[in-house]
Every structure is written in structure tokens, then in C-alpha cells.
Image (cartoon, rainbow, N blue to C red):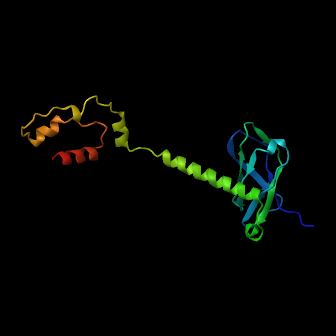
């Protein structure tokens, strides 16, 4: 009888709550080609809030990803079996159970949400940072009084206007070109 190649925990580890963890693993037989890690359904109360993520495994793979979605720490013991290793053709030849599809979809959703966070964290330019540090003016162009029916030279007009100090140089030049 052929025993499946199993993926087991290399060393005991405690999973902190509400987090994704990289877990070192080993397999019961050596890896010689690209394979797929297929998680098993873990038994027991302590494992009910763990999500194991299907992963491509090869000679260079050192970790698998586990999500602890509970509000408690969970300890996984050395040599606990987390799943089996299947050939890459596994998903093409056998329809995977719903649990595996959910695991893959969960991982995709997590990665997508993390990539959105990176876009939000993009830094402003140095010029914009400087402009944001300037205090807001309590007065501005709408409060400046321009005498009626008088021709005002262009240079005096621009000097008499109070532009917000937070404007970028390019924005200020655009305003000046509109006034001219």
C-alpha cells in the first residue's frame, strides 16, 4: 500500500491570535519536483479557527502559511500532520472539495486586501509634505479688496493676492496664468 507524502510541522509553534503565520515544515518523503500542499481537515476544538492555505511546494519552499482567526493563541506540536503533497496535476484531474477552494479564495482575498493597503500608504512628495506643514491662512484672495474701476498693473495685482502657502509651485503658477 502506498502512503501519501505528508507535510508535517518541523518544530512546535504557538500561533498568535488573529494573524497569518509562516510555518516551517518537512515532508515524509523528499521533494524532487514542484508539488501542491493540500491541507487536511484538522480535528479537535483547538484547530477549528485555523485556516491552512494551499501552496505550491518545491525544493526552495521553506514555509507554508497558516491563519489563526481565533481570539486565542493556538499551539501546534512538532510532527503534527497538516496535509498531503500532491502533484501539480492534482487540481486538474480531481475536482477539489469546497474546503480547499475556500482556502485558496481566502488567501487570494487576504493578498488583495494587503495590496490595497500598500497603495493607501504611498508617501506624498517632499514638496507636498512641506506645504502641509504650513499653517492655514485665515485670509485669502476672496477677502482682498480691489478698488473698483481702476486699472491695476499686473505685477501689483499678483502681489496683492494672498495665495495659500500649501499650494504646490505648479498650482500657484497655474493660478497666476489664469489671472494674467
| Residue 95 occupies quadrant | bottom right
Residue lying farthest to the top in this orientation: 138
- Residue 111, position as x, y percentages in the image: 61, 52
Q: Nearer the viewer, residue 153 or 83?
A: 153
**Left or right for 163, reference 125:** left
Q: Residue at x 37, y 42 (%)?
A: 126
Q: Residue at x 13, y 39 (%)?
A: 157
The x, y position of residue 21, in whole percent, is 69, 46
Residue lying furthest front in this view?
A: 149
Question: Quick one: which residue is furthest to the right in this view?
Answer: 1
Q: Which residue is at a point 76% across and 44% down the rendered structure image? A: 49
Q: Is residue 168 left or right of residue 24?
A: left
Percent position (x, y) of residue 93? 76, 71
Q: Is residue 38 left or right of residue 152?
A: right
Quadrant location of residue 166?
Answer: top left
Q: Say whether residue 102 is left or right of residue 121.
A: right
Q: Residue at x 6, y 40 (%)?
A: 151
State which quarter of the image contains the N terminus: bottom right
Amino acid at each position: 500500500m502506498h502512503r501519501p507524502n505528508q507535510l508535517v510541522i518541523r518544530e512546535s509553534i504557538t500561533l498568535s491570535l488573529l494573524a497569518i503565520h509562516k510555518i516551517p515544515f518537512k515532508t515524509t518523503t523528499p521533494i524532487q519536483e514542484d508539488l501542491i500542499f493540500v491541507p487536511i481537515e484538522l480535528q479537535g476544538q483547538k484547530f477549528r479557527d485555523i485556516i491552512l492555505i494551499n501552496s505550491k511546494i518545491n525544493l526552495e519552499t521553506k514555509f507554508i502559511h497558516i491563519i489563526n482567526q481565533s481570539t486565542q493563541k493556538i499551539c501546534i506540536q512538532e510532527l503534527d500532520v497538516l496535509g498531503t503533497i500532491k502533484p501539480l496535476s492534482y487540481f486538474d484531474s480531481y475536482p477539489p472539495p469546497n474546503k480547499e477552494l475556500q482556502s485558496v479564495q481566502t488567501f487570494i482575498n487576504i493578498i488583495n486586501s494587503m495590496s490595497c493597503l500598500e497603495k493607501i500608504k504611498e508617501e506624498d512628495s517632499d514638496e507636498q509634505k512641506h506645504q502641509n506643514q504650513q499653517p492655514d491662512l485665515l485670509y485669502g484672495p476672496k477677502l482682498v479688496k480691489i478698488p473698483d474701476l481702476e486699472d491695476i498693473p499686473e505685477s501689483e495685482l499678483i502681489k496683492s493676492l494672498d495665495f495659500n502657502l500649501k499650494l504646490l509651485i505648479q498650482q500657484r503658477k497655474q493660478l497666476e496664468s489664469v489671472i494674467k
